[in-house]
Amino acid sequence: MRELKIAMLGFGNAGQAFAKLILNKREEIKTSYNCDVRVIAIATGTRGSLVNDAGIDLDKAIEDLAKLHRFAADSADFSETAAMEIAGTVDYDVLIELTPLAIHSGQPAIDHIKAALNRRKHAITANKGPIAWAFEDLRKLAKEQGVRFYYETTVMDGTPVFNLVEETLPMCKVTEVRGILNSTTNFILEELAKGQDYDSVILEGKERGFVEANPSMDVEGWDAAAKTTALLNVLMGADITPDQIDRKGIEGITAEQIREAGSRGKVIKLLCSGILKNGKVIGRVAPEEIDQTELLATISGTSSVVSITTDLMRTVSIVEHDPEIEQTGYGIFSDLIRLIRTT
Amino acid sequence: MRELKIAMLGFGNAGQAFAKLILNKREEIKTSYNCDVRVIAIATGTRGSLVNDAGIDLDKAIEDLAKLHRFAADSADFSETAAMEIAGTVDYDVLIELTPLAIHSGQPAIDHIKAALNRRKHAITANKGPIAWAFEDLRKLAKEQGVRFYYETTVMDGTPVFNLVEETLPMCKVTEVRGILNSTTNFILEELAKGQDYDSVILEGKERGFVEANPSMDVEGWDAAAKTTALLNVLMGADITPDQIDRKGIEGITAEQIREAGSRGKVIKLLCSGILKNGKVIGRVAPEEIDQTELLATISGTSSVVSITTDLMRTVSIVEHDPEIEQTGYGIFSDLIRLIRTT
């Protein structure tokens, strides 16, 4: 039986959801793919690291984090090895990049992935920074080194967007992309529509966990711009960075505007889009009016959608309904299974 | 360079759309996949057949059909060989089944495909009869013979439904399916909602090509039941036939009912569904009220949708928008490319 050794950089909610899937599905993976997967290293920023070539006890790691808010320092696997050192030295087969997003640079996640690829190790990222800031470099490097670089989770969790085009729409050229990809602005616009004022919506959103402590990354459209960049880089070969997106946030949208649009049968959504214009890909994020009878108007709360137009298959849309953290974990897991299936 | 020889049974609109794709993409397939594809046999029911191991002139075949309404009998490739004989004797690598649907039996398409598989030839079907009436038999036979059997086009043209689950949602178990899959009933219900009476809707639909000469297969839900069976057989291993679907058509729906539902914020759609109940898959086709704010309510005209619920990825929906015959041709083409990529 083949062995596949995993190093995880980051062990937040998504990483733990992935670890639980590995715990639940390890035997099924053995049976289905004749492959024994084990996590041999986990790095965190402030909660310590774990390294054990025979395999880390994932149940205990999750339990310790819940109880101690860090890995147990008296565990035999405990280590102070930092993420970059793990990426560069540990004997893994696939690196999984799960460190926090640096939306204006993509670092240090880009360097982590480069370290893996340079060592001819496969890499999977759930962190969209590297796809938004360095996709072409990483894609080429992986190709040169003869290893895989997967990133399905970076947009819409485990909902197939990149794999949809690559695996199921062969030879199609993407000519246009439209999507609703940011749940915070979806939430804010929906609450404003109910008549609440902006400040109470933000306050309530923070309490309910829909709005970050600092909401500006979402409200100003940066998160949507990073996702749009990722989509356009992968699906349309745009080779752009988030600062090149024509970006407008929802700060200027008032409850009055939303009601007025509603009276004309329209809803306002933060729309992400990309089109081909004179051979160049133009990316845009902006609040736009959408007809209530259109599919995109029905995407509310944490749901999201991407509509993909191609030369051969016209427009196909894919929708993720009400995801939880388990669906983020599954995105990473599906990349891992794809890796096992095809290598 | 590898060669791949194709035999086509049926050469209607979908077959011709596929043939045009082959004409346009043959060089690109050579470059991308190092494979030279050529069509060496085409059988039709009443317009003659063409057989030529060096490759049929597809441009001429399409032109002759347009001009003469049959293949030119003085062409060197012309033959009277029937579909079943081509399936059983011609030296092809992949059989493409495109004969007319026999909604109550799936024949003779099932026998055509069996003939191919028994000869260890790959088979692709755009005809949903075989998937609705004999999927398990054909799947097992293809597996035993070590060849491929693909059928993406049978539901929603080239929109990936089967490939979506198989290729991009690995290890997910489908627990529920819902869809809107019949455009004739979509058209009729929409026109009734505008205030037209049933008979004028049918008449106008026939003139505009949305309604068949005999509309009962659509109106009574048989077409939807065949598609639902195909979905449940492939995605949920149901092993059922269309007569086992709890089927109700739209014959009883009145304009008054539609208006009354509309006043409550609902639309009526012919809904296809399948659920797991006590370990058994229960399939259903019936007109149902759907909330106007739901994604399924926005699926109008020739568009269609399937929502797939799984254990690991919750619910993902895929939508095909306003397809033309080219998208049916692409479905067959995408199965062919998948075959080339993976064999």
Image (tube, coloured by chain):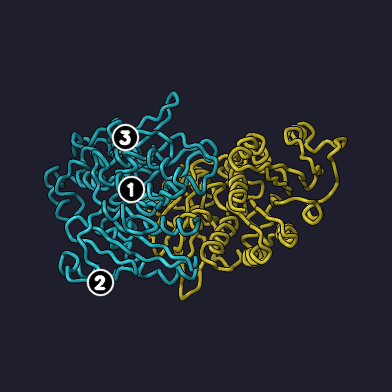
Chain colours: A yellow, B cyan
Please indicate, yes or no, whether residue B24 appears anywhere in the rendered image. Answer: yes
Query: For this rendering, which residue is in front, A49 or B30?
Result: B30
What's the residue type where badge 3 is placed? Thr
Q: Secondary structure at mark 2?
A: helix
Rendered image: mark on residue B241: 3
Residues marked 3 and 2, same chain = yes
Rendered residue at 62%/40% (across/down): A29
Q: Nearer the viewer, mark 3 or mark 2?
A: 2
- Quadrant of the image occupied by residue B54: bottom left
What's the residue type where badge 2 is placed? Lys
Q: Which residue is mark 2?
A: B60
Q: On the rendered structure, is A166 left or right of A314?
A: right
Verify CB contact (< 8 Å) between mark 1 and mark 2: no
Please, is residue B284 above or below residue B73 in the view? above
Q: Secondary structure at mark 3?
A: loop
Q: Residues within 10 Å of mark 1 (few under 14, many from 20)?
A: many
What's the residue type where badge 1 is placed? Ala
Q: Which residue is mark 1?
A: B115
Return the chain for callout 1.
B
- Quadrant of the image occupied by residue B106: top left
Q: On the rendered structure, is A145 left or right of A232?
A: right
